Image (cartoon, helix red, strand yellow):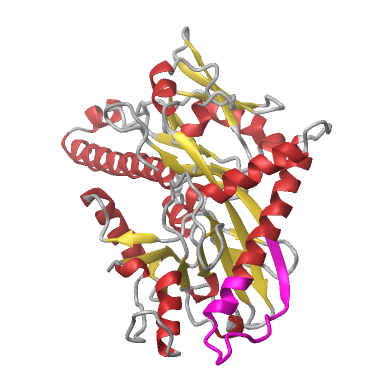
Amino acid sequence: MATRASSSSSSSSLHSASAGAPGADEEGAAPSPAIRVAVLGSGISGSTAARTLADYSAAASAAASAAASAASAASAASAATSPSSPDVRISVFESGFGPGGRTSTRITRDGNAFAFDHGARYISSPAKTDEFREALQGWEEEGCVKEWTGRFVDAEEALSEAVAEAGGDADGDGSAIPNEGGKKKRRYVGYPRMNSICASLLDHDDIEFIPRTRACAAFDETTRRWTLTSHGGRAPLGEFDYLIGSDRLSATDGRADLRDAPLDEFAGAVSEIESVPILVLMVAFESPGLIGVSFDGILFNDKESATESTESEFGSSLGWAARDTSKPGREREDGRECWVVQSTPEAARRMLKSVEEELLGEEATFESKRERVRERAKELLLEEFLNAARKLSSTADGGGEIPKIVSATGHRWSAAFPRVPQTDGTKPPG
């Protein structure tokens, strides 16, 4: 995988390198022109598409070389005029700092290099389709995926167990709860980071990965090719024979990625999908063992598409929390502990509405609004999570001192959960 730092400094070289006309090889064979493919987005789907094409091209080239060698043995003249298999060159454009999409990993730039899987929590097994089951098996064999064998609990059930052990009124036998909500499943994570899956898929000589570049595509009816330019500066990114759009958001009204592309059917289909945002807290503690909390994954509310607020012993904002340093490959030598806390969709809706009301009448910029959301998300989730940690603490009195917080960042995940209409055109029940 060849990685280009950014479009601003290297887009011209990318364009000129790809625009050169192919010539004959030293033996006089007539190689087929290279097929250029652009992929928008480097999540699981975009990275899989790029790798599938690259592997197909490599296999076809190997087969063509074998055929040419066999033909050469029979007739040197025919081999000299036989066309070779066309090369497929893939360029993957990613607006973020690295690959991953929904399987992203955030690494702090404060010298501590705290790593947070702030997107997808994990991959569940058994997978829902045979195709994904095969893909997961392949990733595990390649070593970019490992099973996360932590201790997972439903917070409400765990609290009931603790009350029962202390002689309270809640039913329970005091046993450990091995799986959230009683569901039996295995959990896998990218190794050593969640985005390692996509990084592994893109690790191919015929794939060029171009981060920090949001590409906008336009189709030329005369040349029948796609022209890509960078968003904002409109720097040229090259011309391509085929375009793969792996990010459904690229075709929405708020994005210019495919605004000039004749893809009305695709845009119409994705416009029916609603993006449900959540809030995320990424927090690192000075020492491990958060006041005795021995769980690695805590489910507070599993209603990902809930539209109503649900108050519980732990408040109404928490959805899920994970001790990221318990995942394979995330262990830290300094003993510091990283947690990712995700909100419910309803909590995000309430907070985002509140920020909008706060900013009424103010000349707020996009950046100032985003910073306000991040700060509010951090405050909201940190307060509720620390209160929940005290309740779930395994210390005798449920108290204890919270370890020093060395890093805490709030984040808005705008497209956390897609809500797809049902076959009758209605939205799925919340």
Most foreground residue, 134 or 238: 134
Figure check: 172 above or below 156 = below
Q: Position of residue 256 (x, y in %)?
A: 59, 24
Q: In this picture, which residue range is highlighted in magenta?
A: 387-409
Most foreground residue, 428 or 245: 428
Q: Position of residue 223 (x, y in %)?
A: 47, 11
Q: Position of residue 222 (x, y in %)?
A: 47, 7
Q: Is residue 137 left or right of residue 359?
A: left
Instruction: Report the residue that reaches farthest toward the left.
Output: 74
Task: Please give the name of the residue rendered at 30% of the width and 27% of the height, measured from the top-left corner.
Answer: 83
Task: Please give the name of the residue rendered at 36% of the width and 26% of the height, measured from the top-left corner.
Answer: 30
> Looking at the rendering, which quadrant does residue 317 occupy?
bottom right
Please state, as top left, top right, bottom left or bottom right, where the C terminus lies in the image: top left
> Looking at the rendering, which quadrant does residue 70 occupy?
top left
Figure check: 348 above or below 330 = above
Regarding residue 15, the answer to whether it shows in the image is: yes
Q: Is residue 169 left or right of residue 280?
A: left
Task: Please give the name of the residue rendered at 31% of the width and 32% of the height, measured from the top-left corner.
Answer: 84
Q: Position of residue 126 (x, y in %)?
A: 25, 60
Figure check: 354 above or below 113 = above
Task: Please give the name of the residue rendered at 68% of the width and 80% of the height, measured from the top-left corner.
Answer: 402
Is-magenta flag for residue 393? yes
Most foreground residue, 246 or 144: 246
Instruction: Report the residue that reaches farthest toward the top.
Output: 222
Instruction: Report the residue that reaches farthest toward the front.
Output: 169
Is-magenta flag for residue 137? no
Count of numbered circles on the image: 0
Most foreground residue, 220 or 292: 292
